[in-house]
Image: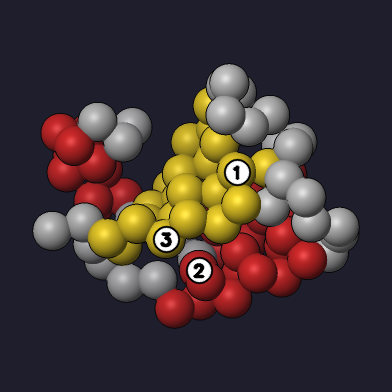
Amino acid sequence: MLVETTLDARDMAPPEPFDKATAILRQLQSGQYLRMLHRRVPYPLFEFCRAMSLAYTVQEGATAACEIIIYFPADEQALRQRGVL
């Protein structure tokens, strides 16, 4: 079973989006993932993800300037089957 945490950072001022996302990611376990809505691509967050061996995807879309999914690589197949990725 996959559990999503959503962080809507579209109206947050820096560094709040980074701080909140990293706090969530430090607690993330297999089977959990973060869906982050942001007004721009948060490039500094990706270095943090790489350091934690987390995978991520970025999609620019209608609901936010960008939607970032951060997850454990072992969960990728389950996320694809569920239509998250």
Q: Secondary structure at mark 2?
A: helix
Q: Is residue 46 shown to the viewer in this render?
A: yes
Q: Earlier in the sequence, mark 2 or mark 1?
A: 2
The residue identified by callout 3 is 5
Identify the residue under disc 2: 25
Q: Amino acid at mark 3?
A: Thr
Instruction: Tell me which amino acid carries mark 1.
Output: Leu
Could you tell me how far apart the alpha carbons at marks 2 and 3 are, in whole angstroms? 10 Å
User: Contact (CB < 8 A) between labels 2 and 3?
Assistant: no
How far apart are labels 3 and 1 at the CA level?
Answer: 11 Å
Question: x, y percentage for residue 56?
Answer: 48, 43
For the residue pair 76 and 34, the one nearer the viewer reads as 34
Task: Tell me the mark number nearer the camera, choosing from 2 and 1.
Answer: 1
- Mark 2 and mark 3 lie on one chain; the one further toward the N terminus is 3
Label 3 CA crowd tier, 10 Å (few <14, some 14–19, many 20+) = some
Please name the residue shown 23% across and 51% down the image. Answer: 75
Q: Would you name the residue on which mark 1 appears?
A: 37
Rate crowding at label 1 as few (under 14), some (14 to 19) or many (20 or more) other CA atoms within 10 Å.
Answer: many
The answer to whether residue 54 is visible is no
Which of disc 1 and disc 3 is earlier in sequence?
A: 3
At x 78%, y 50%, the residue is: 11
Residue 1, percent from left and from top: 13, 58
Badge 1 marks a residue whose secondary structure is strand
In the rendered image, residue 80, in percent from the top left (x then y), is placed at: 23, 33
Q: Is residue 42 left or right of residue 60?
A: right
Q: Is residue 69 above or below residue 81?
A: below
Please count the marks in the image: 3
